[in-house]
Image (cartoon, rainbow, N blue to C red):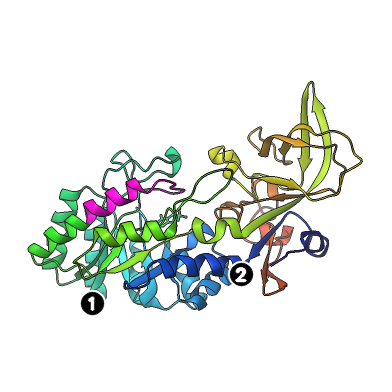
Amino acid sequence: MQIDFEALAEKYGTPLYVYDFDKMTENYRRLKEAFAGEKSLIAYAVKANSNLSVIAHFGRLGSGADCVSIGEVLRARTAGIEPYKIIFSGVGKRDEEIRQALEEGILMINLESEAEMLHVEKVAERLGKEARISIRVNPNVDPKTHPYISTGLHENKFGVEIDMAKRMYIHAKNSPWLDPVGIHFHIGSQLTELSPIREAAGIVADLVRSLAAIGVEIRFFDVGGGLGVVYRDETPIEVEAYAEAVTSAIRGLDLTIICEPGRYLTANAGWLLTRVLYEKRNGAKRFVIVDGAMNDLLRPSLYGAYHRVELLNDTENRGESTPAEVVGPICESGDWLAKDLPLPPTESGDLLLVHSAGAYGFTMASNYNTRGRAAEVACESGTCRLIRDRENFEDQIRLEKGHLEA
Ligand SMILES: *Cc1c(COP(=O)(O)O)cnc(C)c1O
């Protein structure tokens, strides 16, 4: 839909996150259809954008949820996702989180180490409830993405090696408290090359075959997330080719494919709106200071990530564009949203639109510098609605106490 960003900024203030739910629907359907003909479950990776309305939107389309904390599991449940569509992943889970996940009756807990398996077994026994598990295999494949978002190499902390996975499956099969139903890999994020995925899927499918030979029957083939999107000029993987690569790796096996996209579903369906406060120069360098900052959108500071930034005002008579660094008010030199961005002279109140901010945007936001987190708006079928209030000062200090005592 055509979104009137100026009207939204006027009505809800800035910085403001805006999401296009129709676009999210379109992304979801395209991926789901790519797997048509296979048994498949899309489990939205909640950490990309965990607003309850976003999760509920995917839930209504049939999506499950991939969660990396009990908080995310509870978000998914609160948003109406059925337990049998929820997966709990992550390298470190507290016993209490495991217990709650088992009580919720989720589809499976994704294990990332032998030590974790023994904890899950113990908690399941204490609860008298068998735990469905999958094991995250680290196939040692280079995903060719940013090192911070690469996860499928032995040098990363994620998953277990093939031999260890086999030993763990045998243990699980012989345990009355563990039911090994799934296998999982997730080699990285913002993947733009298909060959590492094809390779990883092949390695893991072979493992499924050798497990079958020793009586471990895997039912869920979880290929993780990681599908890349266009931030600047990337050529993303075609989801149809992606689905074909996965499907052909498991040919002859009776498996339900689980796919856990986060970024693919939401990144380009979201924007951060921010207003210009003023400009300044330090020597030759030009800074445009805006009211959005690294506490709102951390990706540039954290990964040096590029986001397209667009000036929404009519600037025809303002003079020439020159390169500017767009920075926020936070007391860190790393607080920037765009570098070397050609901009005409700006005026206080001008509106900038930061593109591709629907994934790992709001969810990475913080209260650094005692800044309230931005409000969030969802647009769908021609209308927009507020889905999270802007945080105020009271919201931020609510849990603090004792400061006027003693
Ligand atoms: C982060 C994560 C995802 C989602 O990754 P995207 O790159 O956003 O698709 C999926 N599965 C697991 C286990 C993850 O940790």
SS for callout 2: helix
Q: Which mark is residue 357?
A: none
- Residue 163 in the image: state x and y as whole percent: 15, 49
| Lower position in the chain sequence, tag 1 or tag 2 | 2
Q: Is residue 189 magenta?
A: yes
Give the extent of the magenta segment: 188-204
Ligand 1 positioned in quadrant: bottom left
Ligand 1 within 8 Å, label 2 CB: no
Q: Which mark is residue 128?
A: 1
- At horizontal 31% and vertical 69% (from top left) the residue drawn is 108
- Residue 169 in the image: state x and y as whole percent: 16, 60
Residue closest to the far top: 283
- At horizontal 81% and vertical 27% (from top left) the residue drawn is 281
Q: Quadrant of residue 129?
A: bottom left
Crowdedness near tag 1: few (<14), some (14–19) or many (≥20) residues, C-alpha within 10 Å: few
Q: Gap in Å between the C-alphas at discs 1 and 2?
A: 44 Å
The residue identified by callout 2 is: 22
Q: Quadrant of residue 35?
A: bottom left
- At horizontal 73% and vertical 47% (from top left) the residue drawn is 310
Do labels 1 and 2 touch, CB within 8 Å?
no
The amino acid pointed to by label 1 is Gly
Does residue 146 sit above or below 372 in this rendering?
above
Crowdedness near tag 2: few (<14), some (14–19) or many (≥20) residues, C-alpha within 10 Å: some
The amino acid pointed to by label 2 is Asp
- Residue 139 in the image: state x and y as whole percent: 26, 47
